[in-house]
Amino acid sequence: MYFIGYDIGSSSIKAALLDADSGRCIASAISPSREMAIQVPYKGWAEQEPESWWREIIAATDLLRQQVRIDSSAIGGIGIAYQMHGLVCVDKQQQVLRPAIIWCDSRAVHIGNRAFNALGKQYCLDHLLNSPGNFTASKLRWIYENEPHIYERIDKVMLPGDFIAMKLTGDIRTTVSGLSEGVLWDFKANAISRKLLDYYNIDESLVPAIVPAFGVQGVLTAAAAEALQLTTGIPVTYRAGDQPNNALSLNVLKPGEAAATAGTSGVVYAVHDKHASDLQSRVNTFVHVSNDEQHLRDGVLMCLNGTGIANSWLKNILGDIDYAAMNSEAAACTPGADGLLVYPFGNGAERILGSRHIGASVRYLDFNRHGRRQLLRAVQEGIVFGVNYGLEIMSAMDLKIHRVRAGNANMFLSPLFREIFANTANTVIELYNTDGAQGAARGAAIGAGYVNMEEAFRGMERLMVVEPEAALQVQYRDVYDKWLTELRSKL
């Protein structure tokens, strides 16, 4: 039996075809070949056209079909992973009413902060485990306040993965994990957060019906099957935000386990067995996909918006270099980059900084000492230091992370990045041959009941283990302490 996984990112759409009997990914694809555009009509905004995600899913599915020929009636389910915290609004005809407000958009920060104070910080942290911040609920309130002509036409609001599920099945549904990532879930009441909806004056009818993360959530319509050249009736059996799904893809399901990504943004997502929150809501807690009535499983997430995007920005500025050469040049410089410090906070408001947008900066640049290799190293160090700052916040929530799993992709392809990460955070790094699309396909196999949680991970291989080294730990800790002192002076 085969299963398809889709990973709807802000840069591209990834697709994977999994042979569930062997656990092997037999085809994978990415579309488009160049990064999808993010619209930034005003400072701090970030939008995308939801229909562009659907077009690229069609294109990615076609690429899968070109790689391997199988009878699509042998496909047992479809899984969806998606960029978190976005907002898609549709009318009664399921037509999109405006561009999606995506994860790195910071226009609603002041709305969430206002709600945090008005509802009471302790109430929010006890019930929502987060400040409303610039999450999905606050983005919807922004539309209410600033685009009333749009708001009055809304029939349903969705996360990006809910939109793709709608395009596949015609049904508008969401999950508890998804509602929690939109800060629409009351953890104490174990129900939709009516108090926040009432405060925002948002009608609960706009929120879709709830389905489990694993299980049949709808079936492929004739129209969707024709567009994808698949068989009508294939069930959608799994959906999750990209970070809970990344954790699933790495078999990170139990308390104390942690998963990391270092794509456009950098994330560490750790599983907790109790409800916990940061007093300043700088890291965020959501319902994990492995949560059930018998086992409380939350995912605590720290996110650094300016991760791979900082490295890709530098690559574009330099113009004559690829990532492998960038890593090689950076590694030729000693730890600390000859005193150069980089703060990669140039991709919207950073939650780990209290939802501030302080911008990226370079400190102690000396025209007589610093060149390309120092800048290349300082960028990678600054990214890891930003992640480690978030890890220290998580540690204060009684999360002790000594081992992190990641896919062998994006910035984890850099030996230098892995070295800086392991030694700054004092953690073992394990790299696996998986990605978000494969995770979504494994989730689909679980949701279809074809495999159980243990069987789902056969075929996944550990490729590498990176251990911290005592001498390097001392060097990076010294540089990190200097970096941290400068950061605190800005906050």
Image (tube, rainbow, N blue to C red):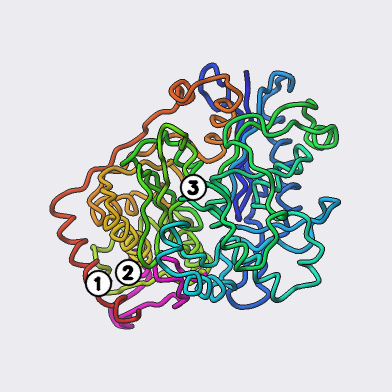
Q: Quadrant of the C terminus?
A: bottom left
Q: Secondary structure at mark 1?
A: helix
Q: Earlier in the sequence, mark 1 or mark 3?
A: 3
Q: Position of residue 61 (x, y in %)?
A: 71, 36
Q: Secondary structure at mark 3?
A: helix
Q: Is residue 363 magenta?
A: yes
**Labels 2, 3: front one:** 3
At horizontal 54% and vertical 16% (from top left) the residue drawn is 21
At horizontal 37% and vertical 57% (from top left) the residue drawn is 277
Instruction: Give the magenta-colored segment's residue range.
Output: 348-377
Q: Is residue 136 magenta?
A: no
On screen, 22 above or below 257? Answer: above
Label number found at residue 166? none
Q: Which residue is mark 3?
A: 243
Query: Are the residues flagged by discs 1 and 2 in contact, CB closer than 8 Å?
Result: yes
Q: Which residue is mark 2?
A: 374
